[in-house]
Image (tube, rainbow, N blue to C red):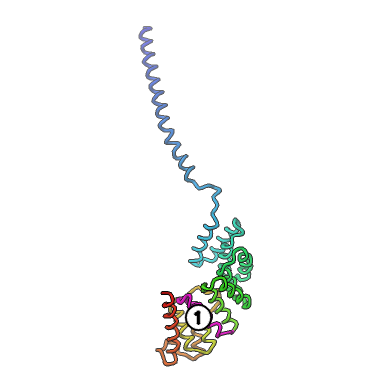
């Protein structure tokens, strides 16, 4: 009996050991699988302390500018400036959006800080348009001249100068600056618009009509420098009314042909210059 009892115990002990070994082995197999998701989640989860770089804010700002989301741009740049208070590009992006939403003095105040940090032609043009929107033509003209001085190939400097001279009533100089801007960027609808208004101020109804029509043909509804500025269609209607021209586009008359030739010659000259 003792012998049978010893044999029974031995068998039971062997079985128990086998079960323990199986359990331990199975546990070891499960351990890596259970740990894997935890490790993966730690390695792939973004840090709670992640901070966007200034360049990231600038890239997102340019994307918002492209779709004219001015309020979104103001919010984004405000957030960026809370972290990078001396980043001139973020200041300029915010100032641009402020100008587009009619907050002209706020735009000027911000650019007054940005320009000494990093003076560039675009910053002067940006501030100059804000000055012009407030009727501060002398300051706008100074910014236009400074932008041209920094980069004579920067068309917006000449464009701002043309718009400012137009507001000052100096139509011959405005026309010359508009043509200088068009020599740098011949397919810019705004410069043709300004050129048309300068010609209208000079009493050249047919020339004004051709330039304004060409502006509309390039881009019917382009983004104006500030809200409330009449678009090319509105100015064309004004010219038609002042010059008692028909509402429908007339066939080129002998009087209109010189203006058409000027437009064609200017476009061809610029194209030849670029070859």
Please say if 14 is above or below 242.
Answer: above
Residue situated in front as seen by the camera: 155 or 90? 155
Residue situated in front as seen by the camera: 225 or 255? 255
Q: Which residue is mark 1?
A: 179
Please tell me which residue is depicted at 47% across the width and 90% down the height of the picture. 245
Q: Residues within 10 Å of mark 1 (few under 14, many from 20)?
A: many
Residue situated in front as seen by the camera: 105 or 92? 92
Residue situated in front as seen by the camera: 269 or 250? 269
Question: In this view of the protein, can residue 221 be seen by the observer?
Answer: no
What percent of the width, then of the height, locates residue 194? Answer: 52, 80
Q: Which residues are magenta?
A: 169-194
Please tell me which residue is depicted at 60% across the width and 77% down the height of the picture. 141
The magenta stretch spans residue 232: no
What percent of the width, then of the height, locates residue 126? Answer: 57, 70
Please say if 36 is above or below 82.
Answer: above
Quadrant the N terminus occupies: top left
Please say if 131 is above or below 212.
Answer: above
What percent of the width, then of the height, locates residue 268? Answer: 42, 80
What percent of the width, then of the height, locates residue 97? Answer: 56, 67
Quadrant the C terminus occupies: bottom left
Please say if 186 is above or below 253.
Answer: above
Q: Where is residue 25, by image quadrant?
A: top left
* Left or right: 58 as drawn, with respect to 250: right
Please identify the dominant SS of the magenta region.
Answer: helix
The magenta stretch spans residue 170: yes
Q: Where is residue 22, by image quadrant?
A: top left
Dot 1 falls on a residue whose secondary structure is: helix
């Amino acid at each position: 009996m003792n012998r049978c009892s010893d044999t029974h115990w031995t068998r039971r002990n062997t079985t128990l050991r086998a079960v323990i070994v199986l359990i331990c082995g199975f546990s070891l197999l499960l351990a890596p699988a259970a740990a894997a998701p935890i490790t993966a989640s730690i390695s792939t989860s973004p840090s709670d302390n992640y901070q966007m770089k200034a360049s990231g804010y600038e890239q997102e700002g340019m994307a918002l500018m492209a779709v004219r989301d001015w309020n979104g741009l103001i919010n984004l740049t405000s957030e960026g400036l809370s972290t990078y208070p001396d980043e001139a590009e973020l200041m300029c992006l915010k100032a641009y959006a402020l100008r587009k939403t009619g907050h002209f003095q706020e735009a000027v105040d911000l650019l007054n800080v940005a320009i000494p940090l990093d003076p560039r032609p675009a910053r002067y043009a940006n501030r100059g348009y804000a000055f012009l929107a407030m009727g501060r033509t002398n300051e706008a003209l100074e910014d236009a001249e400074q932008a041209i001085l920094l980069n004579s190939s920067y068309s917006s400097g000449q464009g701002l100068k043309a718009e400012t001279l137009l507001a000052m009533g100096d139509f011959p100089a405005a026309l010359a600056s508009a043509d200088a801007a068009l020599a740098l960027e011949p397919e810019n609808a705004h410069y043709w618009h300004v050129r048309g208004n300068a010609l209208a101020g000079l009493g050249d109804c047919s020339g004004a009509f051709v330039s304004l029509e060409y502006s509309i043909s390039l881009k019917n509804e382009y983004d104006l420098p500030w809200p409330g500025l009449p678009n090319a269609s509105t100015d064309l209607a004004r010219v038609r009314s002042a010059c008692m021209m028909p509402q429908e586009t007339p066939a080129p008359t002998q009087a209109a042909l010189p203006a058409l030739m000027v437009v064609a010659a200017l476009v061809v000259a610029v194209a030849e210059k670029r070859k």
